[in-house]
Image (cartoon, rainbow, N blue to C red):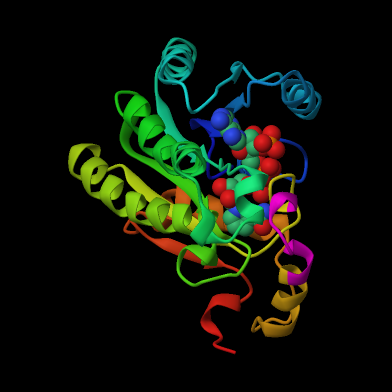
Amino acid sequence: MGMFDGKVGLVMGVANDRSIAWAITQALWAEGAEIGFTHRVNPGAERRIRRLVEGRQPRLLMSCDVQSDADIARVFAAAGETFGRLDFLVHSIAFASPYELRRSYLETSRAGWQQAMDTSVYSLVAVCQAAAPLFVEGATALTITYVGGEQVVPGYNLMGVCKAALEHSVRYLAWDLGRRKQVRVNAISAGAIRTLSSAGIHGFDRLRAHTVKKSCLGRTIEGPELGSTALYLLGPLSSGVTGETVHVDCGYSIVGL
Ligand code: 0WD
């Protein structure tokens, strides 16, 4: 019997088979969860995710631009019609223009800031807001952050500031949703892993190599390690845990130099 048998949720942010959201999906499926998916509004993104999930024939697979309130409303209305409720929600989405990420933080433009904050931070608030009426008592939400939100990681720049805001949003959302429906909201702070979006981070390969040198375990993390921590945070084993950022980074973030 799976830990997620009879549970249904939404995973937002599978771009391809290297996505963190995909590692989480596989862990959830292995434990019996039913999952609906949203992908970015882009024919390539749709093709890639359709290919990945077709064997499972998900009842919900829709595009959703998280910068659009109308899109979010459309998706959660469909989730309501299709599933009638949500036991969990995975938000694995971030974006900053590569142009902004190549520049120093000092040179961040207003438009670049707004786009990055909107896509990477406000989107979590927006989707939790839309999901709230569907969340069952004790439902869970999860997002993904990075140590660049706590410490200066040269090259991570604007996205680091987004992650700081995201982590604090997790705490405020944990308060609001916890008081309302015992809904828990947590974040995984993931170690560096090669995906479509991390490829946009300047010096990402150097950063991964540094992880091997600096982390307690002397290696980088693997997708399944993110999947298993997601199972813990989304499921009953973490029933007393909310508003937390759990580091899954081979101990990288606890080491000073
Ligand atoms: O090392 C890493 N890869 C780490 C990633 C370390 C620590 C944290 N993270 C975070 C990212 O910042 C992000 O929040 O994990 C989350 C997932 O990132 P990922 O799995 O590394 O990246 P990817 O597979 O590219 O998924 C991010 C997706 C986008 O993919 P594409 O490549 O198609 O842009 O975020 C989605 C999109 O699917 N996305 C959007 N979805 C809806 N509306 C939007 C948008 N406006 N923008 C981006």
Q: What residue is at 59 percent from the left and 17 percent from the top?
A: 60
Is 190 inside the magenta-drawn segment? no
Q: How many marks?
A: 0
Give the residue furthest to the bottom: 257
Q: What residue is at 70 percent from the left and 66 percent from the top?
A: 221
Taking 230 as reference, is 175 left or right? left
Determine which quarter of the picture holds residue 129. top left
Q: What residue is at 59 percent from the left and 89 percent from the top?
A: 257
Residue 118 visible at all = yes
Taking 66 as reference, is 28 left or right? right
In this view, 50 is above or below 115? above
For ligand 1, give the image quadrant. top right
**Residue 178's x, y, as percent?**
24, 45
Residue 14 visible at all = no
Q: Which residues are magenta?
A: 199-206
Question: Split into 4 quadrants, where in the image is the N terminus?
Answer: top right
Give the residue furthest to the left: 179
Taking 174 as reference, is 159 left or right? right
**Residue 22's x, y, as percent?**
69, 41
**Majority SS type along the magenta span:** helix
In this view, 49 is above or below 124? above
Is 204 inside the magenta-drawn segment? yes
